[in-house]
Amino acid sequence: MSSTTPETKAPTAETKAPATNRVGLSIKEYGGSKSTLCVGCGHDVITRQITQAMYEMSIAPHKVAKLSGIGCSSKTTAYFADRGHGFNAVHGRMPAVATGALMVNSSLIGIGVSGDGDTASIGAGQFVHLLRRNVPMVYIVENNGVYGLTKGQFSATADAGSKLKTGAVNDLPAIDLCAMAIELGCGYVARSFSGDMKQLVALLKGAFAHRGTALLDVISPCVTFNNHESSTKSYKWAKDHEIPIHEIGFIPYFEEIAVEYDPGTTQDVELHDGSHIRLRKLREDYDPTSKGQALSLCLEAQAKTEFLTGLIYAEPRKKDFLELSGVAGEPIVSIPDARLRPPKKSLDEIMESLK
Amino acid sequence: MSTAVLEEKRPETANRPPVINDFSIHVATANGSGSQSSNNILMRSIFQMGIPVSGKNLFPSNIQGLPTWFTIRASKEGFIARRRDVGVLICMNPETAHEDVKTVAPGAAVIYEESLKLDGLRQDVVFYPVPFQKLVLELVHDGKLRRLAVNMIYVGVAAWLLGIDMAEIEKAVAKQFKSKASAVEVNMSAIRGGLEWAGKNLTKRDPFRLERMNATAGKIIIEGNAAAAIGCMMAGVQFLAWYPITPSSSLAEALIDYAGRYRIDPETGQPTFAVVQAEDELAALGMVLGAAWAGARSMTTTSGPGISLMSEFAGLGYYTEIPAVVVDVQRVGPSTGLPTRTMQGDITSTYYLSHGDAKHILLLPGSVEECYSMAIDAFDLAERFQTPVFLMSDLDLGMNNWMADPFPYPDKPLDRGKVLKTREELEAHIARFKEFARYRDVDGDGIPWRTLPGFIDSPAATYFTRGSGHNERGLYTERPDDYQRNMDRLARKFDTARRFVPRPVVSNGSGSRVGVIAYGSSDFAVEEARVILARKGLPIDYLRLRALPFTTETADFVSAHDRVYVVDQNRDGQMVDLLRLELGPHATKLRSIRHYDGFPLDAETVIEGIEAGEKR
Ligand SMILES: Cc1ncc(C[n+]2csc(CCOP(=O)(O)OP(=O)(O)O)c2C)c(N)n1
Ligand code: SF4
Ligand SMILES: [Mg+2]
């Protein structure tokens, strides 16, 4: 992500007014419309963490472009950052809309919210190409293993052998979105659980500080269609099975870095804007900057149906699509009309060459 | 031997009156055999002699091997539509040679590779056997260059037979090879070799001749796709997303090429536009909507199959009211077979593209000039009406060579439509209308105002973009009255557009009770047909459509005539269908002429259609 923290006035000292962040906004000002999702839906929990992370990162909300496809998950862009612009596109096609919007305005802060149906099925093609291009944005998949909005059909991330409430069994293997993202060159790949708020907020903040696509595959239980005993995407299953690969701390560039740091048990990943992600290792010698390790971690976890969470892969220095396309400077939409139309001399020159 | 001497030695045509500057040359080759340069040189040399020309490439969907024909029409009267009868045939493709010879008009001249032994096929044409393969061995020493150079030999032979000025050929060769000395030399020596061989060995027995005129001075030759690309660039396009498909790829490629030269900001060195080669057409239009939503002048270019894939996003663009320019270079139907042939095949499907009540503005360019000017109009209209606008070109217009006057510099500034881009503009708007509501019709024309993401730091500026369910303020709603009110406003907006789209070109005054309506690339053949019909004592009036929705002139034209022929380049008469829906009681006056064999329309088809109808 580019320029997440514009410099404005620091909040004025002790008053009765609510706490504000570095751009003088309270957390309320990062809120959105009232959710219309089912009570207890995992997606609503994620919405709250997004709001929290944006507030803590002092993101200028009017710079936020909220992009989504179709699904219960995709609706949630309306439930945070009302001061930003939202675009609820068509099913599975948010990546294209995001690519267009972010290409022409390098100053926007893109956040895409999608579902497992939206991303792993109908939108799989566009998802692949978004990652391949490294479009600078945070891309959250609110993964519940089903199609919530169309009432509970299996999605392509449902684990083999998992059962619907109706008793129908899924015979097909799950698509591992994180493994796919690593494969495709994504420079920030994380898995989390909507019930693990502390980890999720840290990962989100890291994602906002990252330049390039940051993928967060967040298990987000659907309480209505996929929260039963035999589901591997239920609250209970996720709570019982979550194995964090590290403890994550996020240190924004504007805060001093604490000194204690033991390379044996902790690892620091410096992000593009100077922020740091500090990982306290729980899994011996796991290095999330190693693509090989990251991929084998995904494969092993899949083989054992393990639910590993954390920052699986980080490659913070990759060029994003705007840099690669030479349009990372002045936003194209800010160029005045007078500079968009070539002068008469240019047209005359072309006409002369055609005579 | 000098050219001048050869010119003198050319014998006069025996017995038949000469046919001067009024015939077509048909070059039959195999695709990928490198005949493109030779054909261009032939065409340009004739053009430089001041004779009106057009060049059409009738090519297969294949990279190498399948038959391809290039037709050059010279017309002293300036007719540049396809001409059905072939005057001069150059037979270079053994696969099609027999068939090619059978289809030429009686009296035609046939230049062919000697070893094909075609001369027994017909008695009523003039055969000129030429030992191309033998000649190329003598003339070109580098074996690798021979395959291409053999095509230059027919340029030389044709030059001698038809009387093409060698000085013009030299100019055309220099232009073709961008003055690259070695290429110019090899090719010129092959051309000269052909010319000299013809001078020594042939006796001219056909009537076809080219003579200098002064009808092309100051004109340009250009393909419609390049013309549209220049238009898009001059319109200030800021974002292009595209997926390669014939016949539209050359438009995107020309645009990337021109913009790479003329749209680099001198101060920053950064391009003032962005390009994405998308993963498919569906993504291409999605990207365009995203970029346009963010405030950029955005476009994509495609053909029928891509239009089908864009259907869902086209509807989203209509309902969310996001400007977009889609250039559709139309071609024949789906999948394999005739994708490299021309058709006006997407008129109805594009007019109503997508589900729900979506309908769209279509612009119908009828010349390369209009490919240019309407590309500019398309951006202005898209932003003025905040909706996708489709520029409906076709393969004939887009990929063939057309003569035109140089394009004028745009005389109006860009029309960016109703955008509140600054805090001052927003505040003035709020002072006038109490608040900014994205989908409210405050001006009575059905067109609302919009803001752009990231521009104004104020909650009053933002709104949420979503498909069908939004009220005037952009808030989520499923209320019937909100939905219906919005749909009625969209209809009002579409009605407003009728007054702003390019108006038809009406040629009344022939005094006839008979009229013809046509659009797009049909114009050339229809204009020619009118001249010929008038000579035959059947003058007809003409209305050329330039846009959908229809404007008032169309109904007026039909009501002022007894019978109106509508020319469509598709089997089912897509435009005549739309006209029937539009016209109500007058629809009974309409008659349909349909051309749908994949080749460009010719005047004879129009003449035959009208004559047959008038005899009834
Ligand atoms: C082209 C198209 N096909 C089908 C649908 C129907 N549809 C709406 S949401 C959805 C699935 C959403 O699943 P997911 O992305 O997992 O979101 P969730 O509701 O589970 O959060 C489908 C199939 C649609 N809107 N558009
Ligand atoms: S159906 Fe499932 S995914 Fe949708 S809102 Fe309800 S709980 Fe959430
Ligand atoms: Mg889901």
Image (cartoon, coloured by chain):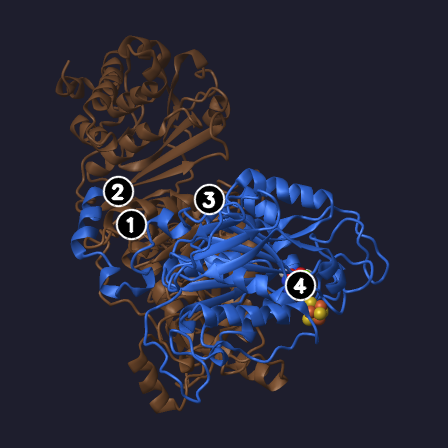
Chain colours: A blue, B brown
Placement of the C terminus of chain B among the 4 image quadrants: bottom right
Quadrant of ligand 2: it is bottom right
Q: Is residue B515 visible?
A: no
User: How crowded is the residue under tag 4: few (<14 C-alpha within 10 Å), some, or many (20+)?
Assistant: many
**Residue at the location (62% across, 58% down)?**
A192
Residue closest to the eye, B271 or B184: B271
Report which residue position mark 4 lands on.
Answer: A220
Q: Is mark 4 within 8 Å of ligand 2?
A: yes
Q: Is residue B355 left or right of residue B78?
A: right
3D distance between C-alphas at marks 2 and 3:
33 Å
Which chain letter goes with mark 4?
A
Q: Secondary structure at mark 2?
A: loop
Q: Residue A178: x percent and y percent? A: 60, 49
| Mark toward the viewer: 4 or 2 | 4
Rendered view: A280 above or below B176: below
Rendered view: B295 above or below B418: above
3D distance between C-alphas at marks 1 and 3:
18 Å
Report which residue position mark 2 lands on.
Answer: B52
Contact (Cβ within 8 Å) of mark 1 with mark 3: no
Report which residue position mark 1 lands on.
Answer: B259
Q: Residue A35: x percent and y percent? A: 62, 77
Report which residue position mark 3 lands on.
Answer: B244
3D distance between C-alphas at marks 1 and 4:
46 Å
| Mark toward the viewer: 3 or 4 | 4
User: How crowded is the residue under tag 1: few (<14 C-alpha within 10 Å), some, or many (20+)?
Assistant: many
Give amino acid for label 1.
Ala
Q: Residue B100: x percent and y percent? A: 47, 27
Q: Could you confirm whether marks 1 and 3 are on the same chain?
A: yes
Q: Residue B345: x percent and y percent? A: 52, 52
| Mark toward the viewer: 1 or 2 | 1
Placement of the N terminus of chain B among the 4 image quadrants: top left
